[in-house]
């Protein structure tokens, strides 16, 4: 499917979501309420068939956290970026996609570890790299008097 | 550590005959500081729980305080056996974002370095996994032949492991006058050596018994767990970034994407051996045709990426490496995320190691070709 067809199908199926052609790839921003159903559809719809979760990243913005999913279809070879913003920045929480793509289990653990985004229904949400005494180091307001020297 | 084990004992259900054993963090076959918490019954593995983060270096956080020309130098330290590919990923991302067209000469040099690095990485993998499986002789042969490639690197850019060679806009120095002659001599020599590698291990009956049919990863699981690189391709997952999203000089050359079907340890082994032959073919197509011209374009003193988000993928020796950059138009990135191949590959091990013995787990880990700083970042 070409990028234009992909954008058209996503727009007609999700009228409220924000679909656009980004700098490199098509992008869609979905609401956190509909995330899980939307992702499930991305994988199960035979025209879309996004079966490969390439990369999952968390970004800290001033008023919310954003989780970005880079998805590829190994069948149709198209690529899509899905973004979802959390409701707030203080208690960020999203639904897990581990049941759709198993690799997300560890990407989500990493995001929880470094940014503090909680994933609902995650099978094993624990810190991955750090121990429990740490804060969330990738947050912009993270302060560490010992390890980080302010210039 | 006692606390962690206690926590697992209290939260997980452990049957009477099962017990927990730490494999690592100081274990020869984990190739670095990786700890696997094994749940065993006798010698049968029931569960593998990787504990990572022993050498986490916070590179993603550090890059937020660095400028774009500085970032490639940190990427060397992640997957140190694919350092040039990591450098190249960041360089390509900056060039594509600024729409800078690099000279043809740069593309050729970068691709030759990519493939030399892949050969060096696979050589080290070959000899180290031979050692994991009890064949120590292989280790000496592999390291001996890898020296040749490292010498070629050293002559051109001064470094042997963390090359720092590719920078936004081109490469740091022009190739050494001896470069082409030495690479050609190496190819000629290595074509004779590669069959020796097969004789030493691939055809060995003990080696085959330990790897054939062990740790089978199906194609569906490879895709679901995001297992890329030779490991994923051995399961039939066509995921070669060089083929599907060509960059640098890969669009100009003819090469095969090697694909396996069995997905067992032996196939992963075989696939990397085949990739070494293919790398030699790729270098041969390029080495005589390096165009004349500049080795870098002049970039601005302060590089600022236009506001937006960028993603660049390259194929390292271990699989798909991705860089995701969020730029707010300043000279430092707002957020950088590295999608490292080792991270996704590692967590597929639990799925395939269940039911095998500890010795088979070593064979699986050897053929997964893990590099720990790549996982911890």
Image (cartoon, grey):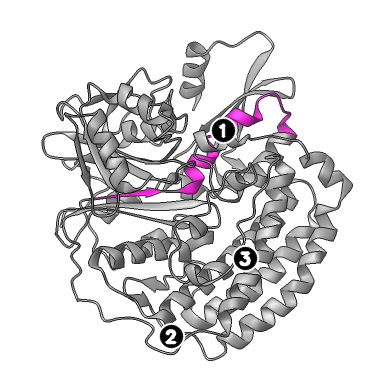
Disc 1 residue crowd, few under 14, some 14–19, many 20+, Cα 10 Å: many
The residue tagged with tag 3: helix, strand or loop?
helix
- Sequence-wise, the earlier of marks 3 and 2 is 3
Left or right: B299 with respect to B376?
left
Camera-side residue: A58 or A75? A75
Instruction: Determine the residue positioned at 47% across, 79% down.
Output: B157
| Quadrant hosting residue B287 | bottom right
Residue B174 disc label: 2
Question: Quadrant of residue B329 in the image?
Answer: bottom left
Which of B101/B205 is in front?
B101
Q: Residue at x 70, y 24 (%)?
A: B355
Q: What residue does disc 3 label?
A: B119
Q: Position of residue B98 (x, y in %)?
A: 23, 67
**Mark 2 or mark 1: whose residue is earlier in sequence:** 2
Residue B221 numbered tag: 1
User: Given this view, does label 3 or label 1 mark the residue nearer the observer?
Assistant: 1
Marks 2 and 1: CB-CB under 8 Å? no
Q: Residue at x 31, y 26 (%)?
A: A38
**Is B194 displayed left or right of B67 in the figure?**
right
**Viewport quadrant of the N terminus of chain A:** top left
Return the disc, 3 or 1, that comes first in the chain's sequence. Answer: 3
User: How busy is the neighbourhood of tag 2: few (under 14 within 10 Å), some, or many (20 plus)?
Assistant: some
Q: From the viewer's perspective, is B280 left or right of B98?
A: right
Height in image: B105 above or below B227? below
Q: CA distance from mark 3 to mark 2?
A: 22 Å
Label 3 marks a residue whose chain is B
Label 2: element kind: loop
Q: Is residue B246 above or below residue A145?
A: below
């Amino acid at each position: 499917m070409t990028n234009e067809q992909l954008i058209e199908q996503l727009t007609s199926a999700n009228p409220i979501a924000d679909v656009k052609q980004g700098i490199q790839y098509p992008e869609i921003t979905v609401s956190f309420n509909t995330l899980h159903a939307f992702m499930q559809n991305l994988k199960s719809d035979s025209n879309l068939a996004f079966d490969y979760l390439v990369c999952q990243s968390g970004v800290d913005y001033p008023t919310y956290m954003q989780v970005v999913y880079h998805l590829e279809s190994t069948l149709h070879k198209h690529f899509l970026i899905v973004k979802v913003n959390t409701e707030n920045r203080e208690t960020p929480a999203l639904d897990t996609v581990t049941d759709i793509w198993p690799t997300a289990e560890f990407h989500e653990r990493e995001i929880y570890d470094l940014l503090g985004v909680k994933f609902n229904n995650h099978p094993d949400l624990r810190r991955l790299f750090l121990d429990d005494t740490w804060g969330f180091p990738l947050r912009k307001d993270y302060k560490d008097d010992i390890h980080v020297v302010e210039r | 550590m006692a606390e962690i084990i206690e926590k697992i004992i209290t939260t997980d259900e452990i049957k009477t005959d099962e017990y927990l054993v730490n494999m690592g963090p100081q274990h020869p076959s984990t190739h670095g500081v990786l700890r696997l918490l094994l749940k065993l019954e006798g010698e049968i593995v029931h569960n593998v729980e990787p504990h990572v983060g022993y050498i986490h270096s916070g590179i993603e956080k550090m890059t937020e305080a660095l400028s774009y020309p500085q970032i490639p130098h940190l990427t060397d330290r992640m997957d140190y056996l694919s350092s040039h590919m990591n450098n190249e990923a960041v360089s390509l991302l900056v060039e594509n974002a600024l729409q800078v067209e690099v000279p043809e000469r740069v593309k050729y040099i970068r691709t030759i370095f990519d493939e030399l690095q892949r050969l060096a990485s696979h050589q080290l993998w070959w000899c180290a996994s031979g050692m994991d499986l009890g064949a120590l002789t292989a280790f000496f042969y592999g390291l001996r032949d890898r020296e040749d490639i490292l010498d070629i690197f050293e002559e051109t850019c001064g470094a042997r492991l963390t090359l720092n060679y590719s920078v936004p806009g081109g490469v740091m120095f022009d190739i050494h006058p001896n470069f082409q002659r030495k690479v050609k001599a190496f190819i000629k020599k290595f074509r004779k050596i590669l069959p020796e590698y097969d004789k030493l291990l691939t055809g060995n009956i003990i080696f085959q018994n330990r790897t054939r049919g062990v740790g089978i990863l199906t194609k569906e699981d490879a895709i679901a767990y995001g297992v890329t690189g030779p490991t994923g391709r051995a399961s039939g997952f066509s995921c070669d970034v060089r083929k599907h999203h060509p960059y640098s000089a890969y669009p100009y050359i003819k090469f095969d994407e090697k694909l396996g079907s069995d997905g067992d340890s032996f196939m992963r082994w075989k696939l990397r051996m085949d990739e070494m032959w293919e790398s030699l073919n790729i270098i041969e197509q390029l080495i005589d045709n390096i165009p004349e011209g500049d080795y870098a374009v002049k970039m601005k003193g302060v590089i600022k990426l236009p506001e937006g988000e960028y993603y660049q993928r390259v194929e390292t020796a271990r699989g798909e490496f991705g860089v995701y950059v969020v730029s707010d138009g300043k000279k430092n990135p707002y957020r950088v995320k590295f999608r490292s191949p080792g991270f996704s590959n590692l967590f597929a091990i639990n799925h395939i190691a269940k039911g095998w013995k500890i010795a088979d787990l070593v064979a699986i880990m050897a053929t997964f070709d893990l590099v720990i700083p790549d996982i911890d970042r």
